């Protein structure tokens, strides 16, 4: 058996649904020992898995060619571009009490006219794509009533916020279709940062995000060292449309690699014009289902000042593109060095995709209209990170991939410690306030990332090809990428009891099993 196998099928063009290579650059030595506790007696591993996957893909593709019309996608030229970057609608605070944020959200179907000829039905919060921006302060009491008017159960997960487990939108706490619930929590002091909200229902998160359910959540500090800078918000999302303007179904390739649409939107606009007239603070969200953003901001000095968990201790000037895996956020200060128009781009990043996919390419995300600005001096110290102390407990996670011929969504399962997510199973336990080190090992051929609820972490080390290195900079994170066969060690402390989820935030991989459950006692 050769180390690299490309599985070719007989039906080469079924609108992206036909998988013509089941594994690209697969490391068989890693996969041959893959555990497979997936509630299926058809789960395969090792070399036999690859032979079976070829037969399975041939059969599935031939069945699809007879039974289902291929999805034709809308050309990228169909949507307008070059319009000014939209300002996002803010969620109205209905409370008149100081230190209280109270509001209403409704998840509902809404028809949006993308062009005079094209109307698309989305699922949206309060009728906007993305949902309305929520802004609150550290220490605020938050009370948000969510009405579910979509035809599926849903939740709202307040991604990255340090709030009680029973208010965090876990899949066990779904809101049935036609029902409502009120989320109530207090934002801790020291929790200022760039967060977001999105569904986290069981087996439904992929579809609901793809249909538009997501929005930003900014927590502000009253002692913000960068408060004098003008701000912009760049909320990146993916949109995949059929030629009829409908939200496209996931293809097999989408399930295997994570969904990527033909349109990358910023604040709901395709390739907008972004005007930067002075040194500007930019908050960035990668709210895409599976797309990695490798951001290039030409013509500017670019300083990284914050990550998932808020400001970093010190600014770091970037001299290369900024890679953000799905769900990661960043705060930048950008300083134009020239006047004129340049392209904001995502530079092609090879993450080991499976299937018949084109080579990674640079993507134009928008136009930057720059006005030359004098150099600036940022504060040398932005904040102090919490000191966690010595770890007294250790946990190890291993990411793997297996074939399952009974799994119709791409024939793949994505596992943690050999197990597929099970709502009835507690995978790990932690003691409240105990400092822990977790080592996450991506024992697969493609990039995955790691996200955990209820806590932020610092990175201790990266290990790849036998070389261990410290992180490039100190920061608080809740989501981090792992390259193939990379090990990352993090330090973390859970300070509230209850059930917490941890998972890959490529939402198709999460749906197909790459999620576990942590009970904090």
Image (cartoon, rainbow, N blue to C red):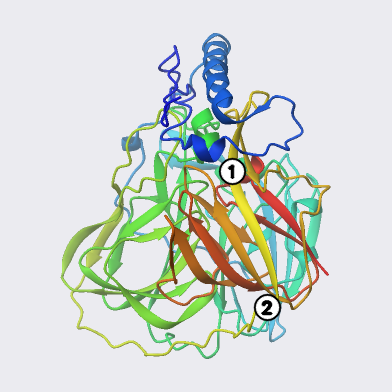
Quadrant occupied by the C terminus: bottom right
Q: What is the C-alpha distance between the residues marked 1 and 2?
A: 35 Å
Q: Quadrant of residue 231?
A: bottom left
Residue 342, quarter of picture: bottom left
Viewer-nearest of labels 1 and 2? 1
Residue 187 is marked as: 2
How far across and down, in percent of the image, does residue 258 sit?
A: 51, 41
Given the current orientation, which residue lies at the most extreme top position? 66
Check residue 280 in the rendering and tell me which mark sits there, or answer none: none
292 sits left or right of 478 in the view: left
Say which residue label 1 marks.
Answer: 400
Query: Going by the image, does 479 lie left or right of 420?
Result: left
Reply above or below: 408 against 327.
above
Q: Choose the circle earlier in sequence order: 1 or 2.
A: 2
Observer able to see residue 10:
yes
Reply above or below: 405 against 201: above
337 and 24: which one is in front? 24
Q: Which of the two residues, 494 or 362, is positioned nearer the viewer here?
A: 494
Q: Residues within 10 Å of mark 2 (few under 14, many from 20)?
A: some
């Amino acid at each position: 058996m050769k180390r690299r196998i490309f599985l070719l099928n007989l039906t080469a063009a079924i609108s992206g649904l036909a998988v013509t290579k089941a594994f690209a650059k697969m490391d068989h030595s890693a996969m041959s020992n893959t555990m497979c506790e997936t509630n299926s007696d058809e789960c395969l591993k090792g070399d036999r898995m690859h032979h079976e996957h070829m037969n399975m893909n041939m059969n599935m593709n031939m069945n699809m060619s007879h039974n289902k019309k291929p999805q034709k996608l809308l050309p990228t030229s169909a949507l307008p571009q070059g319009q000014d970057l939209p300002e996002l609608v803010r969620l109205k605070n209905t409370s008149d009490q100081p230190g209280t944020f109270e509001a209403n959200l409704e998840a509902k179907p809404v028809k949006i006219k993308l062009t005079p000829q094209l109307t698309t039905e989305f699922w949206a919060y309060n009728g906007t794509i993305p949902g309305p921006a929520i802004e609150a302060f550290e220490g605020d009491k938050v009370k948000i009533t969510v009405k579910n008017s979509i035809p599926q159960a849903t939740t709202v997960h307040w991604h990255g916020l340090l709030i009680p487990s029973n208010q965090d939108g876990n899949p066990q706490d779904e809101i049935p279709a036609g029902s409502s619930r009120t989320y109530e929590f207090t934002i801790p002091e020291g929790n200022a940062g760039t967060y977001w909200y999105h569904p986290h229902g069981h087996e439904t998160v992929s579809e609901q995000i793809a249909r538009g359910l997501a929005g930003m959540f900014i927590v502000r500090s009253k002692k913000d060292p960068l408060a004098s800078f003008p701000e912009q918000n760049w909320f990146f999302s993916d949109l995949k449309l059929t030629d009829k303007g409908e939200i496209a179904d996931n293809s097999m390739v989408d399930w295997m690699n994570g969904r990527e649409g033909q349109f990358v939107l910023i604040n709901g606009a395709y390739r907008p014009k972004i005007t930067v007239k002075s040194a500007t603070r930019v908050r960035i969200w990668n709210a895409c289902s599976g797309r990695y953003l490798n951001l290039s901001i030409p013509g500017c000095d670019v300083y990284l000042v914050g990550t998932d968990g808020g400001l970093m201790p010190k600014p770091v000037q970037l001299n290369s593109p900024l890679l953000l895996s799905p769900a990661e956020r960043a705060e930048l200060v950008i300083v134009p060095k020239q006047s004129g128009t340049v392209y904001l781009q995502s530079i092609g990043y090879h993450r080991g995709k499976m299937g018949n996919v084109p080579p990674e390419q640079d993507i134009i995300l928008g136009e930057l209209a720059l006005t030359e600005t004098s150099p600036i001096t940022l504060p040398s110290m932005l904040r102090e990170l919490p000191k966690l102390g010595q770890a007294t407990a250790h946990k190890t996670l291993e990411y793997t991939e297996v074939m399952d011929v009974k799994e119709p969504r791409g024939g793949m399962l994505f596992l943690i410690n050999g197990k597929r997510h099970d709502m009835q199973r507690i995978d790990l336990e932690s003691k409240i306030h105990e400092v822990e080190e977790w080592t996450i090992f991506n024992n697969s051929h493609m990039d995955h990332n790691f996200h955990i609820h209820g806590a932020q972490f610092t990175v201790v080390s990266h290990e790849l090809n036998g070389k261990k290195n410290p992180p490039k900079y100190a920061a608080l994170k809740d989501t981090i990428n792992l390259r193939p066969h990379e090990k990352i060690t993090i330090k973390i402390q859970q300070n509230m009891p209850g059930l917490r989820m941890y998972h890959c935030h490529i939402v198709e991989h999460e749906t197909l099993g790459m999620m576990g459950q942590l009970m904090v006692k």
